[in-house]
Amino acid sequence: MGQGSGSRAAFAALELLAERGYRGATTKEIARRVGVNEVTLFRRFGSKEALLRAALSRFIPAGFLERLPAEEAPLEEGLRQLLEAYLDLLKAHQALLPKLLAELLRHPGLRGAGPPKGILGVLERVVGFFRAQQRKGLLRSDEPPEEMALAFVGPLMARFLLGEALGVRLPLDKAAYLRGYLEGRYGAGRGGQSELR
C-alpha cells in the first residue's frame, strides 16, 4: 500500500466513521472504498482503531497549512488569512466535522494519548503567529498566545456548530469580526490603530 493509498484509506476511514459511527465503519468497507484488500489494511495499520487514529493524525486537508499566516505576516493581513483559511476548512467539511466530533466524544480512545499530529501542527503554526505578533509588540503580551488563538478561532467553531447542529445561521461580517477581536488586544508597538474597515 503506497503513500497515496494510505492517505485515501485515512480519509475513507474518517468519512465512514462520520457516516456510520465506530461500529459501522468496518475495515471491509474502508478497503472497498479505497480499492484495496482488507488484509492490506491490517498489514499496514494492524487494527481498525489504529487505522482511525492514523486517519485523525492526518486530518489536515491538502494545502491548509500553507494558507495559514506565517509568523512574519503583518498582523491584520495574517488574521484575515487565518479567518479565510478556517472558514474555507469548515465549509469544505461541513458534513463531516460535526459527526466526526460526536464520534470522538463517544470514543475518546480514538484520539490516542494526545492531540492528533496534524491538528497539533496546525495549533503550533497558529499559536506561533500570535506569539510572533506579541514579540513584535503588535499584540498585548499579558494574554498567552494559546488563549489569543482560541479566542480568535473558538467563536468561528461555535458559529459553525450552531449552524450545522441547530440550523442557527448568523451572518458574518468578516471586517467587524476582525475589529471586534482586536479591540483591546493591540500592543504598545501598534498604538491601538487599526487599518481594518
Image (tube, grey):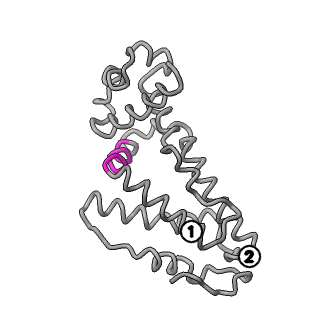
Residue 99 painted magenta: yes
Position of 151 with respect to 37 (left or right) is: right
Q: Is residue 31 above or below residue 70?
A: above
Position of 71 with respect to 101 (left or right) is: right
Residue displayed at 53% across by 68% down: 80
For label 1, the SS is helix
Q: What secondary structure prevails in the magenta region? A: helix
For label 2, the SS is loop
User: Which residue ends up furthest to the left in the rendered image?
Assistant: 167
Foreground residue, 36 or 113? 36
- Looking at marks 2 and 1 on the same chain, the residue that comes earlier in the sequence is marked by 1
Position of 90 with respect to 79 (left or right) is: left
Foreground residue, 167 or 73? 73
The range drawn in magenta is: 95-103
Q: Nearer the viewer, mark 2 or mark 1?
A: 1
Estimate how packed mark 1 is, as few (under 14), some (14 to 19) or many (20 or more) residues with alpha carbons within 10 Å.
many
Tell me the number on the disc at residue 137: 2
* Residue identifier under label 1: 79
Q: Is residue 17 above or below residue 100?
A: above
Residue 115 in picture, x, y percent from top left? 55, 44
> Could you tell me the amino acid type at mark 1?
Leu
